Amino acid sequence: MLTFRQKQNIIKEYQLNEADSGSIEVQVALLTKQISELVSHLKKNSKDHHSRRGLLKMVGKRKKFLDYLGKENPKSYSALVRKLGLKK
């Protein structure tokens, strides 16, 4: 679970302008951070199947966001993937 301060830092880093808090780039960055934290939780708690299901839903949601961004703005997509260190 991300703290309020962590979310604010991610939003500041990936926002497009000062009022932006919900653009695709910000949402993908937040999901990526949540996914990485959940993966580390599942390494310790391998039998937590409820969290595993949530992880799969988050990964699917992030994939849909990235597919949309790739169609709408390929330049921003490639920059975001490179910045987050994702395989695409």
Image: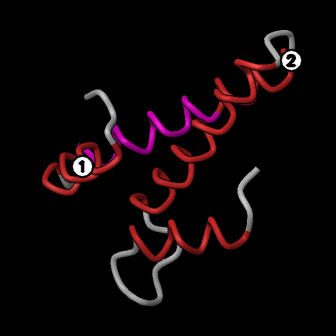
Question: Crowding near pointer 1: few (<14 within 10 Å), some, many (20+)?
Answer: many
Q: Quadrant of residue 14?
A: bottom left
* Percent of width and height locating residue 55: 67, 28
Left or right: residue 49 versus residue 64 is right
The residue closer to the viewer here, 2 or 78, is: 2
Question: Label 2's element?
Answer: loop
Where residue 43 is drawn, which disc sits there?
none
Q: What span is colored magenta in the figure?
A: 58-70
Q: Which mark is residue 77?
A: 1
Total number of numbered discs in the rendering: 2
Above or below — where is 66 with respect to 2?
Answer: above
| Left or right of 17 in this view: 5 | right
Which residue type does callout 1 highlight? Tyr
Amino acid beneath label 2: Asp
Q: In the shown orientation, is residue 11 left or right of residue 3?
A: left
Give above or below for 60 relative to 70.
above
Q: Is residue 61 magenta?
A: yes
Quadrant in which the C terminus is drawn: top left
Q: Are marks 2 and 1 in contact (CB under 8 Å)?
A: no
- Residue 7 on image: x %, y %: 62, 66
Task: Give the class, few, some or many, for how many residues have Cα within 10 Å of label 2's Cα (few <14, many ≥20).
Answer: few
In front: 73, or 43?
43
At x 43%, y 45%, the residue is: 65
Q: Which residue is mark 2?
A: 48
Determine whether 16 is above or below 59 in the image: below
Identify the image quadrant of residue 36: top right
Query: Which residue appears at 55% of the width and 30% of the height?
Result: 59
Measure the C-alpha gap from mark 2 to mark 1. Answer: 33 Å
Judge from the rendering whether residue 42 lies leftward or rightward of residue 16; answer left or right. right
Residue at image position (34%, 38%) is 67
